Image (cartoon, grey):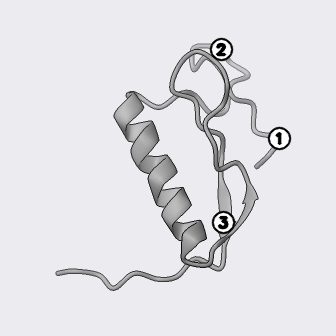
């Protein structure tokens, strides 16, 4: 996943584009941070990329605790 080509979704070689809005990126980052805080291990990704736009790399976590589903 660390090798996924991140970029403009209009370019053929791009495999992962930006998120639609900053609030979605921040929510995703918070979910990753909370998972790590609860014991998950970050293998790759996990932080916003330093470029214009709402880019967040492909992120892989292991040892993620299962949440109780609310019905």
| 68 over 46 or under it: above or below | below
Q: Which mark sits nearer the N-terminus, 1 or 2?
A: 1
Residue 8: give x, y in percent of width and height: 61, 17
Mark 1, residue position? 3
Secondary structure of the residue carrying tag 3 is strand
Task: Tell me if label 3 and label 1 are in contact, CB under 8 Å.
Answer: no
Give the mark count.
3
Query: Disc 1 versus disc 2: distance between alpha carbons?
Result: 17 Å
Question: What crowding class fits label 3: few (fewer than 14 Cα within 10 Å), some (14-19), or many (20 or more)?
Answer: some
Image-based side of 16 in relation to 54, left or right: right
Task: Tell me if label 1 and label 2 are in contact, CB under 8 Å.
Answer: no
Residue 48: quadrant of the picture: top right
| 25 over 61 or under it: above or below | above
Image-based side of 38 in relation to 2, left or right: left
Secondary structure of the residue carrying tag 2 is loop
Residue 25: give x, y in percent of width and height: 45, 38
Q: Nearer the viewer, residue 64 or 9?
A: 64
The residue at the point 69 percent across, 29 percent down is 6
Question: What crowding class fits label 2: few (fewer than 14 Cα within 10 Å), some (14-19), or many (20 or more)?
Answer: few
Furthest residue to the left? 71
Residue 54: give x, y in percent of width and height: 51, 26
Q: Quadrant of the C terminus?
A: bottom left
Furthest residue to the front? 37
Mark 2, residue position? 11
Residue 64: quadrant of the picture: bottom right
Q: Which of the two marks, 3 or 1, is nearer to us in this view?
A: 3
Q: Which mark sits nearer the N-terminus, 3 or 1?
A: 1
Q: Which mark is residue 61?
A: 3
Q: Which of the two marks, 3 or 2, is nearer to us in this view?
A: 3
Q: Which mark is residue 68?
A: none
Image-based side of 62 in relation to 10, left or right: right
């Amino acid at each position: 996943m660390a090798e996924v080509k991140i970029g403009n979704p209009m370019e053929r070689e791009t495999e992962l584009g930006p998120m639609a809005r900053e609030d979605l990126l921040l929510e995703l980052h918070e979910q990753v941070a909370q998972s790590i805080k609860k014991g998950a291990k970050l293998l790759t990704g996990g932080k916003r990329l330093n470029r214009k736009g709402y880019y967040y790399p492909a992120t892989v976590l292991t040892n993620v605790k299962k949440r109780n589903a609310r019905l």
